[in-house]
Image: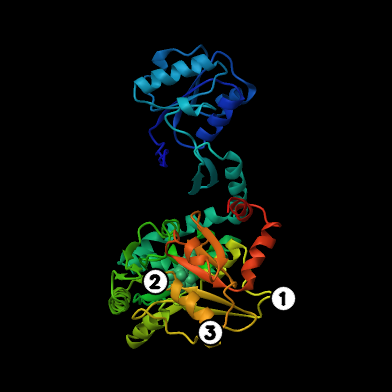
Amino acid sequence: MQYFPLFVDTTSLNVLVVGAGEVAARKTELLLRTHARITLVAPHACSTINRLVATHDTLTWIEREYQPGDLDDQQLVFVATNDRELNRDISSQAKARNLLVNVVDAPQQCGFITPSIIDRSPILIAMSSGGVAPVLLRYLRQKLEADIPRSIARLGQFAEKFREKVKQRFDNLTQRRYFWEDFFDGDIAEQVLKGNEEIATQQMTQYLSETSPMVAGQVYLVGAGPGDPELLTFRALRLMQKADVVVYDRLVSQDILDMVRRDAEKIYVGKAASNHTLPQQDINQLLVDEAKAGKRVVRLKGGDPFIFGRGGEEIETLLEHKIGFEVVPGITAASGAASYAGIPLTHRDHAQSVVFATGHLKDDSINLDWPALVQKGQTLVFYMGLTGLPIICRELVANGMPPSMPIALVEQATTPEQQVVTGTLENIQQRAAHIKPPALIIVGSVVMLREKLNWFQTGSAAIEHAAD
Ligand code: SAH
């Protein structure tokens, strides 16, 4: 993060603006929405500035060229003259005095940059691309503008009005947060947004006198998908942003963890094939303990919690302890890997069924019904199968699959590090020697479609194909 976001209290802030053209006028207009005292220095002013000076007491125009002494007693400086050299000089002088300075359209000379904002005061959304992607930023801003009702400000003011009463009602911080989250999701908030403030006030007063202050903890088993954060469900994201505690394992990517509520406690219970950081029983117990402490617990799992995710075992323990839970499905690795590698798991001409199997080794063997797996028109997907790859290839051939059957290995599917290697049951071991976990194995003639489909795909799949 090159730029640190912060909101500056303008109550006793002195701001200098040098320049009085249209660009300076736009900055000044924005500054005039705050409480800051603004001094503007320029020999001439555009009509907008003239109008602003006439109508605002907090704005003073000094009608002359800039002088270094103008920096005295100032805390923030905006430079917007059309003389580049002068702009650079003022920037250097301001920096020498440790003042925060912004030169319009010259990021190298800036000590700070101003964000793009959506103003629904008291709600203020500020965002920045650090000057790297202004068009993307504008696009995002438009989307947010459309999503955030104009009347959201009214909701902020309504909440402010009830803050003290809610504080008296719930003296515990966590319970207060739950209350407000429910409130913002609920019917009363809807009334405020619609402008029915009187009804909302009545309902709120009633609600506060009724609510039981006891709030029980709850566990959410949430599927985080195979890696790409864009593949999270809305529900997963919402719960991640409401969690008090997040219990996650190795398959959950950093990009996804970054989307968890910042104040949430994050507990790693990761599992690598042979290196169980925390035994499953202890994980189950941890979920119970945290929920009993009244917390909202999100158990974040790679892919889908109910596909090789041991979700079932965790739920059993929760049931034993009568703890409320909910399961949120996620995109399983097979779906993610298939889509991102360009391999449809079923296809009218190739596969009418697909089997998800575990290739996990137990005592150096894989306990699977091999004859049932070797069927015509069936795609096989092996999870946790990398170590067992030689056994998988050997058993499939021993049970009647042709050695020329196509097979694909997809490492870190859906992430920027995704790697795909294709071959046959005969040669895949040599070709895939460099592949590391987590990796998924796909066996079947559908693997051949990757070649064909890539001709029609743009983006990463096509580029990656060209590099194969
Ligand atoms: N619940 C998870 C699977 C957990 S088992 C799901 O539904 O996806 C762990 C195995 O999943 C790994 O050994 C690997 O085979 C597979 N896997 C998970 N994420 C993967 C990814 N991004 N790329 C490739 N394989 C992945």
Q: Is mark 3 within 8 Å of ligand 1?
A: no
The percent position of residue 40, horizontal first and vertical second, equals 50, 21
Residue drawn 50% across and 59% down? Answer: 229
Residue 299 circle label: 2
Q: Which badge, 2 or 3, comes first in the chain's sequence?
A: 2
Q: Mark 2: which amino acid?
A: Arg
Residue drawn 38% across and 23% down? Answer: 95
Q: Which badge, 1 or 3, comes first in the chain's sequence?
A: 1
Q: Mark 3: which amino acid?
A: Asn
Between the residue at mark 2 and the residue at mark 1, the CA separation in whole angstroms equals: 40 Å
**Element carrying mark 3:** loop
Name the quadrant containing residue 46: top right
Residue 349 circle label: 1
Q: Residues within 10 Å of mark 3 (few under 14, many from 20)?
A: some
Residue drawn 42% across and 79% down? Answer: 311
Residue drawn 39% across and 81% down? Answer: 365
